[in-house]
Amino acid sequence: MASVLCYRLGSSRQIYSRFSLITSQSCSGESSYRHISGNRRKRKTEGELWEEYSTRKSYCENFAIQAASGYAVDPKTVFANNEVDLSTIDVYGFDYDYTLACYTCELHHLIYKHALDNLVHRRKFPPGIKDMTYKLNFGIRGLHFDTRKGLLMKVDAFHHIQLGTVYRGLQRLPNEEVLEIYGGTHIPEGLIMSFSGPSYFKQLIDLFSIPEMTLLGNVIEYLEARGIPYDPEYLFSDIHTAVKEVHYSGNMHKEVGADVGKYLESSSEIGRLVNRLYHRGKKLFLITNSPFEFVDRGMTYMIGKDWVNYFEVIVVQARKPLFFNDTTRPFRFIYPKTGTPAWSRVKELRKGEYYLEGNVEQFMKLTGWKGSHVLYFGDHIYSDLADPSLKNGWRTGGIIPELEDEIEIGNSVPYKKSVLWLMALQDLIEANQETKDPECEAVINTWLKERNQLRMDMKQSFNPQFGSIFRTYHHPTFFTSRLCRYADLYMSSISNLLVLSC
């Protein structure tokens, strides 16, 4: 049986559990040093508190070195939110962009440039915004933009704002100002994810959103610095539309197609994976929103001119997520030499041919591929994974390229020292927080300041502005909660499947 066990990213707590057991017995002679309310404990003096502090910090530093080698997570791991027996998967489906095709940073520069030109020349934004520097690592995937307040921020799985990650333009708002604006950190569910209409908070969920976030930051920064009034809702709408038009206009596809090697990462592993699945008798299909010529050039670059022979069904310009919701749109056959669609009704989906648009209901009817025997991979949590998982019973896999860098950071000795010491320091604070001695209270307050600074430093290890895409200080991010809900599996690259016997 080829199966993937339920293993989620998050080994730091596992490492700390072992560390906690060792230190609690070695340092204090007690079975546990966590504070339990109601227990009578001997009150420690200021000197004893600092002695325990020093002992535990030394243990953290030494244990982190051991953990770096003994508890490293493989960046090529396939993680699971749900157990999947791969021997029962007969059909493998793929999105194209950021799933089979992974892009270089040059693509983000290209999208930013074309969207910026759109804003200035078509929408009459101030020409001066073109002088703003493009900052590649400004935003991270999964952030929310408040269209009423004009603020970009990271939100956790429980709809709380992570303080220290709220930006107006390129300026971080002080925590006090954030608390005053929102009356706390919680965002009501109806504002962040409305079930009856549009919400005020827009989540920027895919990798194509990275240049959009930089545009939002730069444009707002420019307007704020010059006292130019603006409505954040219309501003977001204009910028979001400008970015979408880079795709719809075909300008991005033409430039990428003209220089595939500049924009597309070359990897022989994609071809190896497709070849392996095909020769093991698996049925393969491709459903993408991108146009045929664009996909053909990319797939030829990665796999070869015969790439079409591996796939039973190829659907382009599928209009996801409408492909999974609008059951009225029929498929159209595309003439491969001209790229033009035929007018005749499609009654079957034939191998070696290309189809336009369509819908999932007709797709399942014509192929007979249904339910949990289908495993579909994509990078967009909502457009690719949500509906196939919830409505059609397909198994789903999320492709999250950021995983690789975040795991590498998490495996490093400095980061492990920080995370272990943060947890140990938090335990020290909790165990001694009821002290009444003024000198000991001063020690606890010093520890609290150190803890807060440590959290900020750890956040900046991933991204200076917003930290990790997977966690806030305490909890999983809203992005992570959606990923865990809609993806059975997730990994940094589709080629990670090569480590499994699928």
Image (tube, rainbow, N blue to C red):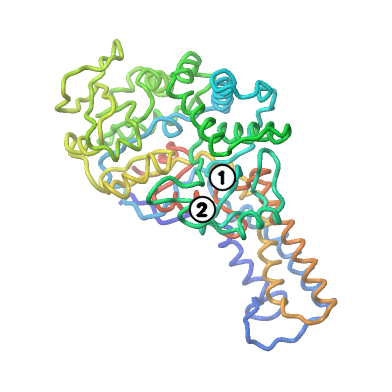
Q: Secondary structure at mark 2?
A: loop
Examine the image and state in which quarter residue 404 appears: top right
Q: Is residue 18 above or below residue 46?
A: above
Q: Does residue 441 appear in the picture of this structure?
A: yes
* Residue at the far bottom in the pictured view: 40
Label 1: which residue? 148
**Residue 439: quarter of image:** bottom right
Q: Picture coordinates of residue 326 (x, y %)?
A: 27, 37
- Residue 362 drawn at (x, y percent): 20, 35
Q: Position of residue 410 (x, y in %)?
A: 61, 50
Vertical relation: 329 (above or below) 457: above
Along the line of sight, which residue is nearer the eye, 330 or 350?
Answer: 330
Query: Could you classify mark 2 by the number of other residues whose Cα lies within 10 Å: few (under 14), some (14-19), or many (20 or more)?
Result: some
Kind of residue at badge 2: Leu
Label 1 CA crowd tier, 10 Å (few <14, some 14–19, many 20+): few
Residue for badge 2: 9
What residue is drawn where x is 68% and y is 73%? Answer: 430
Does dot 1 land on a helix, a strand or a loop?
Answer: loop
